[in-house]
Image (cartoon, rainbow, N blue to C red):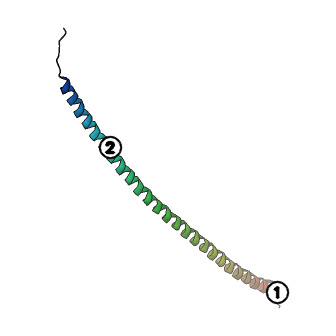
Amino acid sequence: MNQTIEVNLVDVLNKLDSKIDKLSEDVTEIKIKVTRLEENQENFNKRLDSVDKRFDTVDKRFDEVNSRLNTLTLGFLGIVGVLVAGLLTIIGKVVFFTNI
């Protein structure tokens, strides 16, 4: 069963034009969204750089505190070592050389 359908060529072209216009609007919207994403990525990269700088300063401070703590620990252990050696010397003198 064959049917003949008559379609005006102008109508077909108008429909195609409207579809193409809609697609071109969608493409421009996509381009706008992509540029916004690129701007957001640039802002994120700037913030990430500032976070990296902060981490660097924190690392430097941590290293400084660590070196100070090591210096204080060595100094404290040195003083305690001298005191213990002096006390052991006095105790040894009293125990072994009671006559002198």
What is the CA distance from the residue labelled 2 to the residue labelled 1?
97 Å
Q: Quadrant of residue 16?
A: top left
* Amino acid at pointer 2: Ile
Q: How many marks?
A: 2
Which residue, as the protein is rendered here, is positioned at the far top? Answer: 1
Q: Position of residue 91 (x, y in %)?
A: 75, 83
Mark positioned earlier in the residue sequence (2 or 1): 2
Q: Which residue is mark 2?
A: 30
The kind of secondary structure element at disc 2 is: helix
- Residue 68 position (above or below residue 91): above
Task: Compare residues 27 and 63 and report the one nearer the observer.
Answer: 27
- Residue 97 position (above or below residue 16): below
Residue 28 shown left or right of residue 61 in the figure: left
Q: Which mark is residue 97?
A: 1
Q: Position of residue 52 (x, y in %)?
A: 49, 61
**Residue at screen point 44% across, 56% down:** 45
* Amino acid at pointer 1: Phe
Location of the N terminus (image quadrant): top left
Q: Position of residue 60 (x, y in %)?
A: 56, 68
**Residue at screen point 35% across, 51% down:** 36
Task: Compare residues 6 and 55 and report the one nearer the observer.
Answer: 6
**Residue at screen point 39% across, 51% down:** 38
Neighbor class of circle 2 (other Cα within 10 Å; few <14, some 14-19, many 20+) is: few
**Residue at screen point 66% across, 75% down:** 74
